[in-house]
Image (cartoon, rainbow, N blue to C red):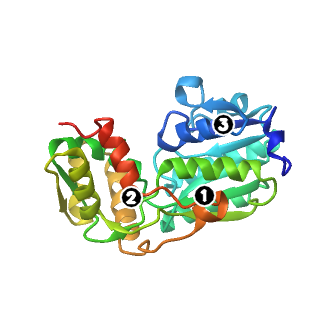
Amino acid sequence: MTDNAANTQNTTVVVTGASGRTGSRVAQAARAAGFTVRAASRARGFDWEEPTTWAHTLRGADAAYLVYPSDVGMPAATEGVRALAREAVGLGVRRLVLLSARGEQQALATEEALKASGADWTVVRASWFAQNFSEGPLVEELRRGELVFPAGEVQEPFVDVRDIADVVAAALTSGERYVGRTLELTGPRLLSFREAVAEISEASGRELTYTPVPARAYGEALAGFGVPPQEAEFLVEVFEGVLDGRNARLTDGVQQVLGRAPRDFGDFVRDAAAAGVWKA
């Protein structure tokens, strides 16, 4: 891949998690940049848990965006990324971009697995997604009027997943510039979860409340909802780590790569409220 964005034509990018929060936007941004996108999902015959499905998806591609479906810090993610990255390199897909989690110690092993694969790698370490409030398990709680979550009053620089997608596309069109680099992405301001819910409440015209709970209590609730005990315990460990204030600082990652400020949380909230996301 060269530095000339025009050479994205005839370049094929595999996008894993293509129906998910980041993957769907990465696919859109990659197409807009001129790439041919090969969407990889279970519906299209790709399964992280079935290595026999990987070669068919990877063969003939030039690059791939890797997002592990549960959490990048899980042991299964480390082994999955290690094996898939090696297979990709063996098939000639050397340019790999991994979505990782900012401040999550458990994710470092997965990042190292990518780096050791022989790929031309880039790690995109993102803060908490703004879209976690509009897509995924937190949405139903907000629709019922209360978000119960183990974040205390810690502040987080919520990042818009559209910015993540734009950064991934830019990294892929910039030749060697971002090879061997870790890009840390945040939004432009710090907000507590209570403040985030208050902004959603105002924009949606609904009375919404935020109730912080200890991570252990939240894990017990998850187990009660049917989350496997081992997964619930892992999530408790993640929440106790990433929601301890370590991420309460801004970075200029989006500005450095895109040459513009990251999207503000308020812009995301207004768009989602206008679409009726949080209606009861």
Select label 1 or label 2 by which is in front.
Answer: 1
Using a 10 Å C-alpha cutoff, classify the residue at mark 1 as few (fewer than 14 neighbours), some (14 to 19) or many (20 or more).
many
For disc 1, the marked residue is: 124
Is 31 rendered above or below residue 75?
above
For disc 2, the marked residue is: 234
How far is the residue under mark 1 from the one under mark 3?
20 Å
For the C terminus, the quadrant is: top left
Nearest the eye: 137 or 133: 133
Q: How far across and how far down the image is residue 242, in percent?
A: 41, 67
Is 209 rendered above or below residue 27?
below
Q: Amino acid at mark 2?
A: Phe
Q: How far across and how far down the image is residue 183, in percent?
A: 62, 63
Q: Amino acid at mark 3?
A: Ala
The residue drawn where x is 22% and y is 58% is 198
Q: Does the image show residue 68?
A: yes
In the displayed structure image, the side of residue 218 where residue 46 appears, left or right:
right
- Which numbered disc, 1 or 3, marks the residue that appears first in the sequence? 3
How far is the residue under mark 1 from the one under mark 2?
22 Å
How far is the residue under mark 2 from the one under mark 3?
37 Å
Using a 10 Å C-alpha cutoff, classify the residue at mark 2 as few (fewer than 14 neighbours), some (14 to 19) or many (20 or more).
some
Res 63 quadrant in image: top right
Q: How far across and how far down the image is residue 44, in percent?
A: 58, 24
Badge count: 3
- Which numbered disc, 1 or 2, marks the residue that appears first in the sequence? 1
Is 231 rendered above or below residue 69?
below
Select label 2 or label 3 by which is in front.
Answer: 3
Q: Secondary structure at mark 3?
A: helix
In the displayed structure image, the side of residue 88 where residue 243 appears, left or right:
left
Nearest the eye: 207 or 57: 207
Using the image, tell me which numbered label, if any, was put on residue 32: 3
Res 32 quadrant in image: top right
Q: How far across and how far down the image is residue 223, in percent?
A: 25, 49
